[in-house]
Amino acid sequence: MAATDATAESIDRPLVEPGVLEQRSYQTKLADAAAADHTLVCLPTGLGKTAVSLLVTAERLHEVGGKSLLLAPTKPLVQQHADFYREALTIDDEEIVVFTGEVRPDDRAELWESATVVVATPQVVENDLLGSRIDLSPVTHCTFDECHRASGEYPYTYIAERYHEESVDPLVTGMSASPGDDEEAILQVCDNLGIREVEVMTSEDADVEAYTHNTSVNWERVELPEPVVEIRDALQDVIHDRMTQLKELGVTSSTQADVSEREIRKIQAKLRELMDNDQSEGYQGMSLLAEVRKLRTAVTYAETQSVESLRRYLERLREAARSSGASKADQRLISAPKVREARRKAEDFDDLHPKFRRTRMQIAETLGIHDGERVIVFTESRDTAETLTDFLAEHFTVEKFVGQSDTDGSDGMTQTEQQETLEAFRAGEFEVLVSTSVAEEGLDVPEVDLVLFYEPVPTAIRSIQRKGRTGRQTEGAVVVLIAEDTRDEAYFWKARQDEKRMEEELRTLKEMAGDIESHLREQMGLEGYEETSPESDDTTAGSNAVEAVETTDDPADADDDDEQTVQGAADGGEGDGQTGLDAFAASDDGVTESPTGEADDQPDQDEETTVATADGEDTIEVVIDQRELDASIGRDLSRRDGFETRLETLEVGDYVLSDRVVVERKTISDFLDTLTGGDRSMFEQVKDDARYYDRPVVILEGDGLYEERNVHPNAIRGALASLAVDFGASVLRTDDESGTADLLATIATREQETDDREISVHGEKGSKTLPEQQEYVVASIADVGPVTAQALLEHFGSVEAVMTAGEADLLDVEGVGAVTAERIREVVGSEYQP
């Protein structure tokens, strides 16, 4: 941000409110460059990257028209940008709209049509693109704030690809203080966003230097007390044991307890190869590796956070191990003698981690001796943030600042609470803000006198983001706490080296602007982008989209195990012969033929429901349930030529592929959870599917169906048989999300193109019959399940009789043992204590 003061010269440009933006030559230079081509703008934190983007937006809207889209990774940052745009642009406030998850999808679709500037989180825009609610063709400027996130499956990559494909006249501006840890990472960000120019300003530039101040960085080392070392050593003994077992399996040569994440990834890759070859050692090793990961987290809590944080973590592990359907790894880990010893010592430890006292001393020195006003304390752990807030509140006025999601034992902050906390901090209503990573990126946190890292962070990007909270208006200070002889040391050196390398890379990039442009054009094959350049007279969108980064391995060949694919009776056909596999092969035009060669009888076509592309060709539509958005399947399908996706909150199924085909998607873990956890919701779901659709399909995704859990194969076969025989569902297997997307595309194409069927989202779940309601009530008691519920009702005759039955009477019912009877009586007879 760059609000002017009474003496500063202000910017005078079309659509920019006079007197709001201070005239800073480095900002106008960057804006002029970014208005000419797809550009990455690198500028130190606090020096007005958003002002640069706003100037580009104003020029594009004035010269070209259309809409502007500004994307930011968090809701508070989105709201902050929207407030700034409303203040600094002459556009009516009603035309600058905010898109977050708190705005209803239908309202977003309506607002999109009338808006001139949309400020949004990328997840919401991704969802609206998947749901075909918005059209990017009129967007003439798209800004990706904190663009270093544009990698892998983060929505920036997908949105950029769609933007370059759809916009009539696209222009991309990427903004970051720290675009990557090395040249390769920076170029990858540019590739993913379709960027071909890099503009860099550093604090060493003469134009920038006048607006920056020195920031001192001090590293404070603390020594762990002996009880904490003993807790750490007990946990590391277990890691050493599990690593020894992994070495015996031949997947690693190391047994060190301080195994690196890189080594863990190598081990995981070798174990996956064993699993792909259906070797039991692979599954055994994956279970051991899961324990190693959890134990490494526990060690990190003990060494670098606090014993209280460790206690909370170990308690969550114990609760998970006790829950129904717990994995063998969880149960084995929590019962290990050394883990029990560590938990006991943690519970007996009544002192503080030395970092707590050092934090208090640093804050007292800043606020007391040096007459400071504000301090930010950053920590990786929400557990630590909450514990530290309570501790510091005994001496200072303190508030925490955490993300919006709820976690085990911790409530998140709402967007309103976050905004109110930041406003109070700016107004000086409290002195210390204790924050997790949510305040690292871009937020207009006021100038602070001290930024304290409770622990080092392992990446240069995050280190730079945190340090940028100070040293803007006056000299600032940064203190990093390091627990000696812990992974704090490794993180500290890694971030320090990466930061130096990044600074050097940025200098190099700045000096090699011409070479970078050439490199990016070669890397992305930008010949197709020539048509979409802002300075081009041709307004046709380029045909070459930015390629998304593939992060998944190629799917393994599917097993030819008859037990792993159960074909439902509903798909059965007449005739003695088996349909040949060539009947399912794609024809020359890419259409998959029906095995019978004929279309089934179908209702009359409704022209209003037919989806067509602009050139008149019909598209294949897939309706996706909102709850499936965590998977990459929707993005995969929407990228495919001739496919269109629509999002709805489906009452029945996860995917609707025609008026007769609905799909329930279950990972292997989800499926096994239904068998081991007493949760029979999957069978209820498939029952509802069969009620409304003639061809229900269950897709089981992943491997290890018979190996992942200690579930008898006959129980698994029985569940598969029940889905097929009792509910008429076809049960199909896929290796991963990519395979599921391929299968959905194949089925949808056969249904809609080959058999000429429509998409039809059928009505809500029907109300349960009286017996079903009675079974539901009884089944919910202590999770006894529907089978036991039916046995109880048949034995006692009514819900009331079941509720009043004594434990001895309950034991007379077939299938009810002592544990179940005791649980039922405990739930029914215990006093309610909210």
Image: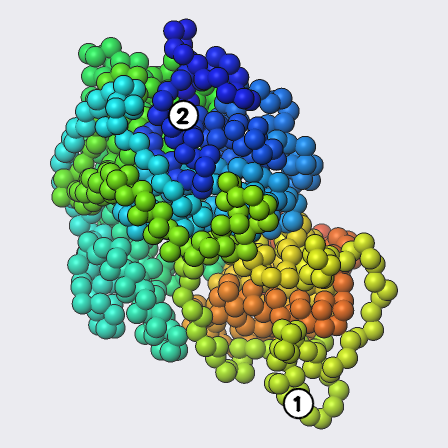
- Judged from this view, the residue extending furthest toward the front is 537
The residue beneath circle 2 is: 28
Provide the secondary structure element on which disc 2 rests. Answer: helix
Q: Nearer the viewer, residue 736 or 771?
A: 736
Tag 1's secondary structure?
loop
Q: Mark 1 and mark 2: span between their CA atoms?
A: 71 Å
Regarding residue 64, the answer to whether it shows in the image is yes
Horizontal placement of 686 versus 405: left or right? right
Can you tell which of label 1 and label 2 is closer to the viewer?
2
Q: How is the image coloured?
A: rainbow
Q: Where residue 578 is drawn, which disc sits there?
A: 1
Do the residues under discs 1 and 2 have CB atoms within 8 angstroms? Answer: no
Which image quarter holds the N terminus? Answer: top left
Q: Outermost residue, top direction?
A: 6
Camera-nearest residue between 335 and 470: 470
From the top left corner, tell me how far across and down residue 429 is, in percent.
40, 13
Earlier-in-chain disc, 1 versus 2 = 2
Note whether 274 is above or below 99 in the view shown: below
User: Which three-letter amino acid code belongs to the residue tagged 2?
Assistant: Thr
Expressed as whole percent of the image width and height from the top left, the position of residue 302 reads: 24, 43
Badge 2 local density, few (<14 within 10 Å), some, or many (20+)? some
The structure residue drawn at horizontal position 23% and vertical position 28%, both measured from the top left corner, is 204
Q: Position of residue 109 (x, y in %)?
A: 67, 39
